[in-house]
Image (spheres, grey):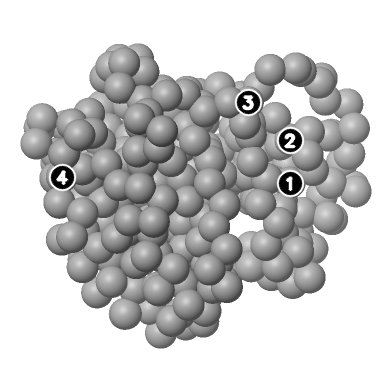
Amino acid sequence: MQDKLKVAIIQSNLVWEDPKENRKNFSEKIETISDSVDIMVLPEMFTTGFTMNVSLVAETMDGKTVVWMKKTASETNAAIMGSLIVSENNKFYNRLLFVEPSGAVTHYDKRHTFTLAGEGKVFVSGSEKIIIDYKGWKICPLICYDLRFPVWARNAENYDALIYVANWPKPRILAWDTLLKARAIENMSYCVGVNRVGEDKDHNEYCGHSAVYDVLGNNITPIKPNKEHIEIVDLDKNHINFYRNKLRFLDDMDMFTV
């Protein structure tokens, strides 16, 4: 078990519906990371942008992006995670993949599809909450719109970190900032949010605001908005244990069945 977990947040623009170009761009960004890190976090739908044109860009679990993620994880000796459009059994999923250096793959399918954009008409909603055990850390991966639903994120599993990957648009960025902070405070865990920047084909603008909040809700990442940026952050298990043992707020939480 590691007391500290070094996380690289990759806040990036995305090329619309072009997986090959996006893989190339992220490869170039990852090559600039000189520090040894444990996890690299990419945005939601990092190969395409937030498109509903699934028949054009969907991939399988043995497709080029999964191969690329395995190769990248192996070469950097770091886990890599982000979501992409996956086709499986004639259905489409907004699927987050967590790929370890060993080649092991864990996936989470987005529970809350974004009704406002018609995501639920195209993608099948996930039904299972996933907790990843990596280097002695328990990580709960979630996707974008999931952030608005605190019951789904409730820390019944005693996880150490929530990680959200997103395409969260600029007009509602206050909600992103506020809810990331709230999820950290109410769950007494680190909360990591990785959002994209730039503009998509539908002229939706994204301004980043990627961040990491500690268990008290402090933003420990001075990431500039509106710019591509890589930030490396140390998560500290001692910080979690100290405040959980001192304050014991999780002992009094309500339990829910979803």
Label 3 crowding class (10 Å Cα cut-off): few <14, some 14-19, many 20+? some
Label 1 sits on a secondary structure element that is: loop
21 is higher (above) or lower (below) than 254? below
Residue 42 position in % (x across, y down) = 38, 55
**Kind of residue at badge 4:** Glu
Label disc, if present, on residue 152 of the rendered structure:
3
Asked whether residue 178 appears in the rendered view, the answer is no
Which quadrant: the N terminus? bottom right
Tag 2: amino acid: Asn
Q: CA distance from mark 3 to mark 1?
A: 13 Å
Pick the front one: 253 or 96: 96
Mark 1 or mark 4: which comes first in sequence?
4
Q: Which residue sits furthest front? A: 89
Q: Viewer-nearest of labels 3 and 4?
A: 4
Residue displayed at 87% across by 41% down:
247
Q: Which residue is mark 2?
A: 155
Residue 33 percent coordinates (x, y): 38, 78
Residue type pointed to by label 1? Tyr
Q: CA distance from mark 3 to mark 2?
A: 9 Å
Image quadrant where residue 237 sits: bottom right
Please tell me how crowded label 2 is: few (under 14), some (14-19), or many (20+) other residues with Cα within 10 Å. Answer: many
Number of dots carrying numbers: 4
Question: Helix, strand, or loop for circle 2?
Answer: loop
Residue assigned mark 4: 17
Circles 2 and 1: CB atoms closer than 8 Å: yes
User: Would you say residue 33 is visible in this rendering?
Assistant: yes
Residue 122 at x, y percent in the picture: 30, 22
Residue 113, label in figure: none
